[in-house]
Image: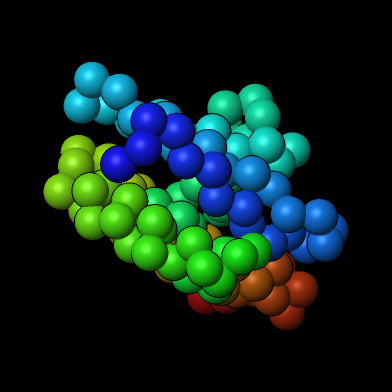
Amino acid sequence: MKPETIIKVISSSGEPYDVHFEFSDNKFKVHCNCPAGIYGKLCKHKTGLLDGDLSLLFNKTDYEILERIHEVVKKSKYSEIITSYNILKKEIEVAQKKEKKLKEQLEQSLKTGIDIS
Ligand SMILES: [Zn+2]
C-alpha cells in the first residue's frame, strides 16, 4: 500500500471531503477534513470508509483502494473496537426507547391519577 492515500468522500454540502490514510511502521493513521474530522473526532467518513462503505466514494474508481484498506482493517484491533462500539450504540438506542416509553407512562399516570388504593 502507498504510504499516503487520499480518498474523496461525498458530503451533504456537495463539496467532497478528503480522507487521508497514512501508512508507516505497520500502523496507519486516518484523517478527514470534514468539520468533525479536523479536530480528530470520529466521523462517519472515517468509520464508513474503514467499514468498506462504497456509497461514500466521490470517485467510484477508488473502490479498489478502499477494498484493500478494508481488508487490512478487518484484521486489526480497530475492527474489534468498532464492533463493540456499534453494539453499544444499538444497546443505548434500545435503552433510550425504553426510557421514553417509561417516561410517557409516568407522565400519563400523573395526568390520569396514580392508583393508591
Ligand atoms: Zn469526516
Which residue reaches farthest left? 75
Residue 64 horizontal side relative to residue 98, left or right: left
**Which quadrant holds residue 28?**
top left
Residue 58 percent across, percent down from the top left:
64, 64
Which residue reaches farthest top? 25
Q: What sort of colour scheme is used for the picture?
A: rainbow
Q: Is residue 112 above or below residue 78?
A: below
Q: Is residue 60 visible?
A: yes
Q: Is residue 116 visible?
A: no
Residue 110 percent across, percent down from the top left:
70, 68
Say which of 113 and 67 sits in front. 67
Residue 34 percent across, percent down from the top left:
70, 41
Q: Residue at x 55, y 71 (%)?
A: 60
**Which quadrant holds residue 31?**
top right
Say which of 97 and 4 sits in front. 4
Q: Residue at x 45, y 33 (%)?
A: 4
